[in-house]
Image: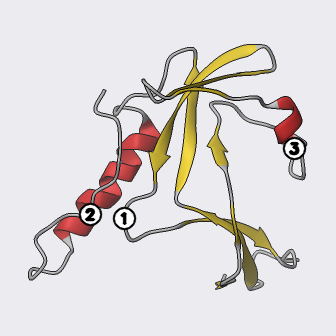
């Protein structure tokens, strides 16, 4: 199966959240009215509640030189063999990574995945540029 991504140079900048749960909904939601985030600028930790559960979050940066993208299928494929086309509906350079009750640490799966991208860039990078890309990730 072939997958094509249609780039949109005017894609909106999005405020993204990675929640520690599965939500059985795929569509618009009135996030700004119901998901209220409080931020402690001194510690960099965010707090919110979702369905009565306390969440703690941190701002995670997409590695330098990369951009996160929200992709939407422009037309659903009718079979597994049919080519699919995805449109870039929005993009982001940072997102809030949430955890139940305590903020995520550097050992969180998502933080480790972001670090793996940086390691891969170092391993497969240009020998003429020994400086690795830097992202702002917590050292906890």
For label 3, the residue is: 25
Q: Position of residue 93 (x, y in %)?
A: 52, 60
Tell me what residue is drawn at x 71 percent, y 75 percent: 11
Would you say the residues marked 1 and 3 are in contact, meaning their CB atoms lie under 8 Å apart?
no
Q: Residue at x 21, y 73 (%)?
A: 124
Q: Earlier in the sequence, mark 1 or mark 2?
A: 1
Q: Is residue 32 above or below residue 128?
A: above
Residue 133: which numbered mark, if any? 2
Give the secondary structure at mark 3.
Answer: loop
Please report the residue visible at 90 percent of the width from the left and 42 percent of the height from the top.
30
The label shown at residue 64 is 1
The crowding category of the residue bearing disc 1, from other C-alpha atoms within 10 Å (few below 14, some 14 to 19, many at least 20), is some
Q: x and y percent of residue 99 in the render?
A: 56, 25
Mark 2: few/some/many CA within 10 Å (<14, 14-19, 20+): some
Q: Describe the element under mark 1 as helix, strand or loop.
A: loop
- Please provide percent x and percent y for residue 20: 62, 30
Most foreground residue, 140 or 76: 140
Disc 1 to disc 3, how far (Cα)? 31 Å
Q: Where is residue 140 drawn, in percent x and y?
A: 31, 26
Query: Disc 1 vs disc 2: Cβ atoms closer than 8 Å?
Result: yes
Label 3, residues with CA under 10 Å away: few <14, some 14-19, many ≥20: few
Q: Is residue 79 above or below residue 46?
A: below
Quadrant holding the N terminus: bottom right
Depth-wise, is mark 3 or mark 2 nearer the camera? 2
* 25 left or right, relative to 69: right
> Could you tell whether 37 is left or right of 74 in the image?
left
For this rendering, which residue is in front, 75 or 89?
A: 89
- Give the number of the mark in front: 1 or 3: 1
Q: How many marks?
A: 3
What colour scheme has been applied to the protein in the rendered image? secondary structure
Instruction: Tell me how far mark 3 sits from mark 2, CA to CA.
Output: 36 Å
């Amino acid at each position: 199966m072939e997958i094509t991504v249609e780039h949109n140079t005017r894609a909106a900048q999005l405020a993204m959240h990675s929640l520690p749960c599965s939500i059985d909904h795929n569509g618009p939601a009135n996030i700004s009215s119901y998901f209220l985030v409080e931020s402690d600028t001194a510690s960099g930790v965010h707090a919110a509640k979702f369905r009565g559960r306390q969440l703690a979050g941190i701002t995670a940066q997409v590695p330098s030189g990369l951009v996160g993208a929200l992709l939407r299928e422009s037309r659903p494929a009718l079979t597994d063999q049919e080519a699919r086309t995805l449109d870039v509906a929005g993009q982001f350079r940072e997102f809030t990574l949430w955890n139940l009750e305590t903020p995520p640490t550097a050992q969180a799966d998502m933080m480790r995945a972001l670090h793996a991208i940086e390691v891969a860039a170092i391993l497969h990078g240009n020998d003429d540029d020994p400086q690795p890309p830097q992202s702002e990730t917590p050292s906890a």
